[in-house]
Amino acid sequence: MTKVLLVSGFLGSGKTTLIKSLAEYFSANNVKSALIINEIGEIGIDNKYMKRLGYNLWELFGGCICCTLASGLVDTMEQLKEYEPEVVMIEPSGGADPKTTIDALVDMDIERKDIVNFFLLDTTRLEMFMAVLQPLLQSSIHEADVVLINKTELIEENTFHEALRIVREIKPEVPTVKTRRDNLIDEEMAGLVNKFLTKEGD
Ligand SMILES: Nc1nc2c(ncn2[C@@H]2O[C@H](COP(=O)(O)OP(=O)(O)OP(=O)(O)O)[C@@H](O)[C@H]2O)c(=O)[nH]1
Ligand SMILES: [Mg+2]
């Protein structure tokens, strides 16, 4: 059964950066992965050029297959079936509520236990999130299976604790990981990812 790893988070919170690291990690560990992304420009690939060549899917990051959401989530998941990935990573748009994507996946008969939602919280913008994005922050954290408290090399310890407090207030039981871009897939993250990939059905 294919697992789906959703990487959610507001605009610029580090989703593509994490996905790149995960793709490299999967490739190094012989896990067949695929990636569905909204905007291909940001990962340094000229989508128009690929389209001109007639590709709907293409390989990047050492074997990770990639496609865009241009044709819709259902069609895109369908296209990927042929490739039989162990894990499909999805980066929804930073402005979207991850619940919309999760609901769409569940409608495709993917069980919720086969979906994991990593929510990236950009700690450099906590004040702004609290001031103008409270509802989206609330629902995003509610839907998260893991919250990554990110960009932590840029902040003071008290801001990190403030981030933790915000997360705990919304979803006390959600696992959290302290992350920064230069060390994303450390032992703790690798453990979380592997636990999800090897999780059996009930
Ligand atoms: N300092 C620092 N910068 C980071 C970290 N993670 C990501 N960034 C930077 O933040 C910027 C946005 O990162 P992306 O990975 O493109 O974020 P995104 O969530 O995919 O952005 P959108 O797709 O535009 O919503 C880039 O310049 C990254 O290098 C981090 O842990 N620390
Ligand atoms: Mg991105």
Image (tube, grey):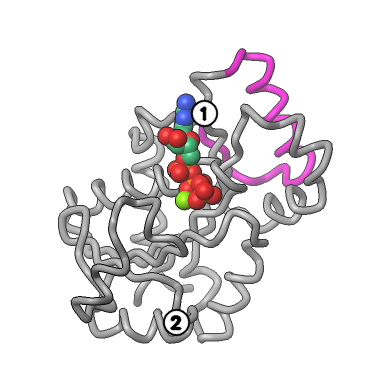
Residue 194 at x, y = what percent? 34, 52
Q: Residue at x 49, y 66 (%)?
A: 115
Q: Amino acid at mark 1?
A: Lys
Name the quadrant of the N terminus.
Answer: bottom left
Q: What residue range appears in magenta?
A: 155-178
Magenta stretch contains residue 166: yes
Q: Residue at x 41, y 57 (%)?
A: 196
Residue 92 at x, y = what percent? 53, 62
N-term mark: 2 or 1: 2
Q: Residue at x 51, y 28 (%)?
A: 151
Which residue is disc 1 drawn over? 151
Nearer to us in this view, 80 or 1: 80
Question: Ligand 1 closer than 8 Å to the CB at disc 1?
Answer: yes
From the viewer's perspective, is residue 195 above or below residue 114? above
From the viewer's perspective, is residue 96 above or below residue 130? below
Nearer to us in this view, 202 or 71: 71
Which residue is disc 2 drawn over? 71
As helix, strand or loop, the secondary structure at mark 2 comes to helix
